[in-house]
């Protein structure tokens, strides 16, 4: 149930009155599924072919109980890792709940992962059982002999593996008592997308969902309104807004299974078709929507919209408000903990800001000595350790890294930001993304935002390029909108555009036009690739 006591309270009152309420015993599935009436709608699922299924909480619970019994029959015990390599299906959500019910640790894998990424995660996690879609079966079969921990492969959507998901679930009993887990018991294993080295597993306890009260006071979810998330269920910003956050408060979700990657027209049509009132998306998706011809032909009924996963440029917020009458609320967080900062319906939205620290989250902008920086100065976003239920149990099987990163007084995000006099936080970039030119510290995000405000630019990324005089200069990689061509004149126009809006030292002294920008699977710009590209060739 949604607690309406937060509305319409001002931000400062919410912060002053907020207290965490973390029970000693808590289970994700019990909170997301078991407590709801069986006949309440949980999900409307569609795929690209036009198939549709309406799923109730009772149906989710029935399948989840059967999954839990099936896994128990395969020898899965509390604390064992169960991996799911599945698309966004009702069965996938039920499988997740079944793992939680049993006390297992869920590892959700993306169908977009390459073979090496899948194998690394299976091996590093020590996954005991893998539930895989038939479309991924051949890839799994090729690597299975190298994953020593893997005892069973359960296949959904076809034949193969050790047993059929559909048959095994049908045979299993629907009677299962959700395990009485402690709030601190492990529940979820996410792998971080680091720029160097192999991805590390970040282990979260069941209690981490209790930190997502933003679905009450920020998203303002409602039981009589559809919620849609454009993210895939392999990441924290996919599973939480796609399933866990809305379901905890009894809000039905609209789920779309795509044939391929994200297409803006498909998503806008989905939002219109189901009269979705609340949406969670990404800046990359919003920028793609900005390129849709005649966007007003999609008659949306959005009451609320938010974005997270990467910095949100002001131009995207303005565009969405002009086209659909809804202001996008920006959020900030990481796999380790989120949302550290967010915007709220009861406060002014300042375009380009990530909002203010969320109630209950002790966030500060600190210098290298862990001292607060002055108002308006750049510093590192830090979170006081163990100050909220989302704080991780640690890195999987990496005690030294866990102590180094999570054991101190502050968790260092490595993200650079500044805060204004009212406490609004403005993102500047990663620690290693900040450009130091002639002694000036330049945040790449402000350069990119300024470029995107020009009608010729659909997307941009700014990095440091070595310079013999200034140490570094700003180099921008720019994707032009339809109807614009690369030219020296365009370079000069964009440089003057940024110079006049930012400063004489922050404009890009070098601009390279590109067809697209390198990105991670979650849509974040791979600046490490662009920094390498910006380096002069070695002799």
Image (cartoon, rainbow, N blue to C red):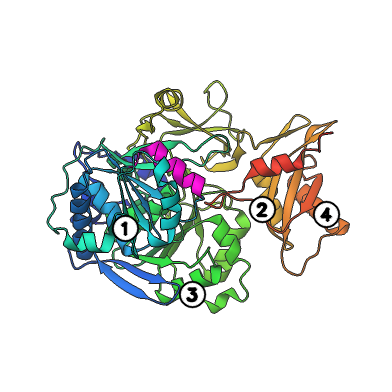
Query: Outermost residue toward the right?
Result: 488
Mark 1 surroundings: few (<14), some (14-19) or many (≥20) residues within 10 A? many
Q: Secondary structure at mark 3?
A: helix
Earlier in the chain: of badge 4 and badge 2, it is 4
Q: What span is colored magenta in the figure?
A: 115-127
Mark 2 surroundings: few (<14), some (14-19) or many (≥20) residues within 10 A? some
Instruction: Count the numbered circles shown.
Output: 4
Q: Secondary structure at mark 2?
A: loop
Q: Residue at x 81, y 50 (%)?
A: 495
Q: Secondary structure at mark 4?
A: helix
> What is the C-alpha distance between the residues marked 4 and 1?
48 Å
- Near-viewer residue (426 or 227): 227
Earlier in the chain: of badge 4 and badge 1, it is 1
Mark 2 vs 1: CB contact within 8 A:
no
Q: Magenta segment: does it hold 141? A: no
- Residue 466, quarter of picture: top right
Earlier in the chain: of badge 2 and badge 1, it is 1
The residue indicated by pointer 4 is 491
The residue indicated by pointer 2 is 517
- Residue 470, quarter of picture: top right
The residue indicated by pointer 1 is 93
Is residue 520 shown left or right of residue 86?
A: right
The residue indicated by pointer 3 is 269
- Near-viewer residue (88 or 501): 88
Q: Residue at x 12, y 56 (%)?
A: 175
> What is the C-alpha distance between the residues marked 3 and 1?
23 Å
Mark 4 vs 1: CB contact within 8 A:
no
Residue 39 visible in the displayed image: yes
């Amino acid at each position: 149930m949604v607690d309406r006591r937060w509305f319409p309270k001002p931000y400062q009152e919410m912060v002053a009155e907020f207290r965490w309420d973390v029970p000693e015993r808590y289970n994700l599935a019990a909170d997301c599924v078991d407590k709801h009436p069986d006949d309440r709608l949980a999900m409307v699922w569609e795929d690209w072919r036009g198939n549709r299924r309406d799923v109730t909480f009772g149906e989710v619970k029935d399948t989840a109980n059967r999954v839990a019994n099936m896994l128990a029959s395969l020898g899965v015990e509390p604390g064992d890792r169960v991996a799911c390599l599945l698309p966004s299906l009702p069965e996938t959500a039920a499988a997740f709940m079944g793992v939680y019910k049993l006390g297992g640790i869920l590892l959700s894998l993306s169908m977009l992962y390459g073979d090496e990424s899948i194998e690394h995660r299976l091996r590093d996690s020590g996954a005991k059982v893998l539930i895989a879609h038939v479309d991924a079966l051949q890839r799994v079969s090729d690597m299975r002999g190298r994953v020593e921990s893997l005892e069973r492969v359960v296949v959904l959507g076809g034949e193969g593996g050790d047993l059929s998901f559909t048959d095994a679930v049908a045979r299993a009993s629907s009677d299962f008592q959700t395990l009485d887990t402690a709030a601190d018991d492990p529940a979820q294993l996410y792998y971080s997308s680091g720029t160097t080295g192999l991805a590390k597993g970040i282990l979260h306890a069941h209690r981490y969902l209790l930190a997502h009260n933003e679905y009450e006071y920020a998203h303002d979810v409602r039981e009589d309104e559809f919620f849609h998330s454009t993210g895939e269920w392999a990441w924290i910003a996919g599973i939480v807004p796609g399933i866990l956050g809305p379901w905890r408060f009894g809000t039905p979700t609209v789920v779309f299974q795509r044939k391929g990657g994200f297409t803006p027209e498909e998503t806008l049509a989905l939002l219109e078709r189901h009269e979705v009132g609340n949406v969670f998306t990404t800046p990359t998706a919003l920028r793609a929507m900005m390129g849709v011809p005649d966007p007003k032909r999609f008659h949306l009924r959005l009451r609320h919209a938010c974005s997270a996963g990467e910095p949100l440029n002001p131009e995207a917020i303005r565009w969405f408000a002009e086209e659909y009458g809804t202001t996008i609320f920006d959020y900030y967080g990481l796999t380790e903990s989120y949302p550290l900062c967010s915007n709220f319906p009861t406060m002014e939205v300042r375009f380009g800001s990530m909002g203010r620290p969320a109630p209950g989250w002790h966030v500060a902008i600190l210098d290298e000595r862990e001292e607060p920086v002055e108002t308006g100065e750049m510093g590192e976003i830090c979170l006081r350790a163990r100050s909220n239920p989302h704080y991780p149990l640690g890195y999987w099987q990496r005690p030294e890294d866990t102590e180094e990163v999570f054991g101190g007084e502050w968790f260092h995000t490595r993200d650079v930001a500044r805060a204004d006099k009212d406490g609004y936080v403005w993102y500047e970039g990663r620690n290693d993304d900040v450009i130091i030119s002639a002694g000036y510290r330049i945040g790449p995000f402000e350069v990119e935002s300024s470029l995107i405000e020009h009608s010729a630019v659909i997307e941009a990324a700014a990095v440091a390029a070595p310079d013999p005089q200034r140490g570094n200069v700003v180099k921008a990689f720019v994707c032009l909108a339809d109807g614009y061509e690369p030219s020296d004149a365009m370079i000069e126009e964009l440089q003057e555009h940024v110079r006049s809006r930012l400063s004489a030292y922050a404009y890009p002294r070098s601009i390279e036009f590109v067809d697209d920008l390198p990105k991670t699977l979650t849509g974040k710009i791979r600046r490490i690739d662009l920094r390498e590209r910006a380096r002069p060739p070695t002799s």
